[in-house]
Image (cartoon, grey):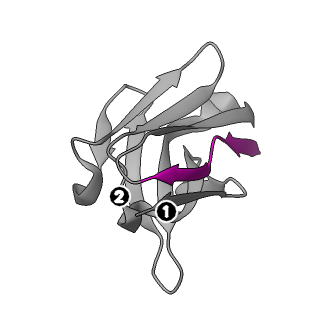
Amino acid sequence: QVHLVESGGGLVQAGGSLRLSCAASGSIASIIDMGWYRQAPGKQRDLVARITSGGTTDYGDSVKGRFTISRDNTKNTVYLQMSSLKAEDTAVYYCNAGVRIIARYNYWGQGTQVTVSS
């Protein structure tokens, strides 16, 4: 079992910045990657950014150059630094942790709202 707790969402003006945090606990050693997904009303949940246990990062096309994912292994925490925010970044952001036993299994946080006012 992996438990994820997100923090850092809120309301920000367009062009501003926010940093999201996701702290993992439980079976940390089984995690192969962690990341952030987002879901706007009426839309599917999409990848924002992901970082593997080896440090490889991957970003959704719409956030490349604006968002940065990082991690602090000593705190079992992943961060998402969001800059140059746009109204279209408004969504609920979910932390994700992938574990592999036989097949991949995903754990999700409760979600944190990010609202960008234009």
Amino acid beneath label 1: Arg
**Residue 89 higher or lower than 30, as above or below:** below
From the viewer's perspective, tell me whether residue 27 is left or right of residue 14.
right
Q: Residue at x 28, y 42 (%)?
A: 66
Image quadrant of residue 6? Answer: top right
Helix, strand or loop for disc 1: strand
* Residue picked out by circle 2: 86
Mark 1 burial class by Cα count in 10 Å: few <14, some 14-19, many 20+? many
Q: Is residue 23 magenta?
A: no
Amino acid beneath label 2: Lys
Image quadrant of residue 88? Answer: bottom left
**Residue 108 higher or lower than 78, as above or below:** below
- Label 1 – label 2 distance at C-alpha: 14 Å
Judge by depth and name the residue closer to the eye, 100 or 2. 2
- The answer to which of marks 1 and 2 sits earlier in the sequence is 1
**Residue 65 higher or lower than 78, as above or below:** below
- The answer to whether the residue labelled 1 contacts the one labelled 2, judged by CB atoms less than 8 Å apart, is no
Q: Residue at x 59, y 56 (%)?
A: 94
Q: Which mark is residue 38?
A: 1
Helix, strand or loop for disc 2: loop
Quadrant the N terminus occupies: top right
Q: Residue at x 68, y 33 (%)?
A: 23
Q: Which segment is the magenta one?
A: 1-13
Q: Is residue 11 magenta?
A: yes
Q: Count all numbered tags in the image, as a single digit.
A: 2
Percent across and percent down for residue 46 are 41, 66
